Amino acid sequence: MLVLGIETSCDETGIALYDSSEGLLANALYSQAATHAEYGGVVPEIASRDHIRKTLPLIRQALDDAGKRVADLDGVAYTAGPGLIGALMVGAGIGRALAWSRGIPAIGVHHMEAHLLAPLLAAETPSLPFVALLVSGGHTQLVRVDAIGRYTLLGESLDDAAGEAFDKAAKMMGRGYPGGPEIAALATAGRPGRFRFPRPMTDRPGLDFSFSGLKTFTANTVRDLQPLTGQDAADVALAFQDAVVDTLVIKCRRALKATGIDELVVAGGVAANTDLRKKMAASVPAVYYAPPELCTDNGAMIAFTGHERLAAGAVEPLAIATRPRWPIAELAPT
Ligand code: KG4
Ligand code: ZN
């Protein structure tokens, strides 16, 4: 079964082809990051318009890369949520129309489920059940995974997402968007020990997160340092990154202990952070990631997730339905 995957939930147009027997055959990506950079964050209307421009050319490119034709497709998967409504509608509209024109099934994929399953595309894969830490620009969640589609939310952020905190910290220091890679790069020149930032909500029981206090602490530190030198920025970046990473590691260990599970999956854009990976490796018995290029938004994870559901016989009505908000625990098992 050959499935086309379409990701347009935010600022990346991702198109991929996944085949039951041949695996991932193509993975084309266009990032709008440079377009949004001058605004300091994603502008939803610009994102939708750019997806309209890029989706069809990237579908053609992915088919060419794989040596396939539209007639070879057996199904189409597109991101149906959560995400920016206008951006989602582009992928959903094109995906459903393409499937309808070919008489093949289409399926709306949950973006965070796709992040969560992306590690199954790596060489080393986890076994069920596992605990997943989902850390992206919009979500910070700990999820117990018993099977594809059987998810229990263990904890989540009460305010900002971890990726969002990285983005805002970078912005405070006049750095570009997305902030995660900027902070990570700055932190390499940071001197340990100059600042110690709080590890929010780690001193009381529970698996929820909160990053807004850390954001305020960072803002106050940066304000007190004005004019900020390059070394100041590096030291703040390191202290900030240490605080976020420690908090995530502590909560993951706690979730594994509470569930009695020893395999952890870390997924979403923040999973690309090398410091996070280093500290997780030292603190958790078994941790799995998607290949680095499949940690941030991409079409491959959508094609794969759609494939798993379509191959299990999922059937959806023709209506083009998208959901800006969509709790992952509402998903049905395959
Ligand atoms: O999963 P993703 O690509 O998009 C969403 O679904 O949100 O995640 C994007 C987020 C951004 O907030 C970005 O700053 C963060 O992931 N990110 C990182 C790194 N690379 C991307 N955060 C920390 N370190 C990184 N290396
Ligand atoms: Zn994402």
Image (spheres, helix red, strand yellow):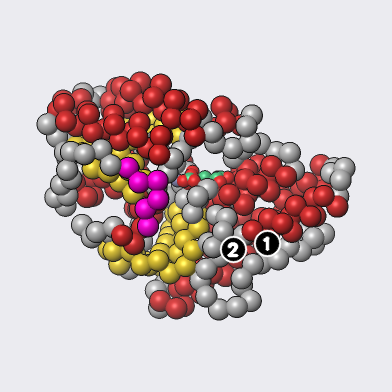
Kindly identify the amino acid type of the residue bearing the numbered disc 1: Gly
Q: Name the secondary structure under disc 2.
A: loop
Q: Quadrant of the rendered structure where residue 192 is?
A: bottom right
Viewer-side residue, 169 vs 272: 169
Farthest-out residue, left? 103
Q: Is residue 190 magenta?
A: no
Residue drawn at x 41%, y 28% as measured from the top left: 51
Instruction: Name the spot of residue 149 as percent of width and height, x first.
Output: 27, 59
Give how far apart the Cα atoms at labels 2 and 1 are.
7 Å
Question: Residue 210 bears which disc, if any?
Answer: 2
Q: Is residue 190 visible?
A: no
Marks 2 and 1 in Cβ contact (< 8 Å): yes
| CB at disc 2 and ligand 1 closer than 8 Å | no
Q: Is residue 315 visible?
A: yes
Quadrant assignment for the C terminus: bottom left
Q: Quadrant of the rendered structure where residue 55 is?
A: top left
Crowding around mark 2 (Cα neighbors within 10 Å: few <14, some 14 to 19, many 20+) is many
Left or right: where 134 falls relative to 152: right
Residue drawn at x 31%, y 26% as measured from the top left: 59
Kindly identify the amino acid type of the residue bearing the numbered disc 2: Ser
In the figure, 257 relative to 234: above or below? below
Q: Is residue 323 magenta?
A: yes
Which residue is identified by label 1? Answer: 213
Crowding around mark 1 (Cα neighbors within 10 Å: few <14, some 14 to 19, many 20+) is some
Instruction: Name the spot of residue 170 as percent of width and height, x first.
Output: 68, 44
Left or right: where 150 falls relative to 136: left
The stretch of residues the image draws in magenta is 322-327
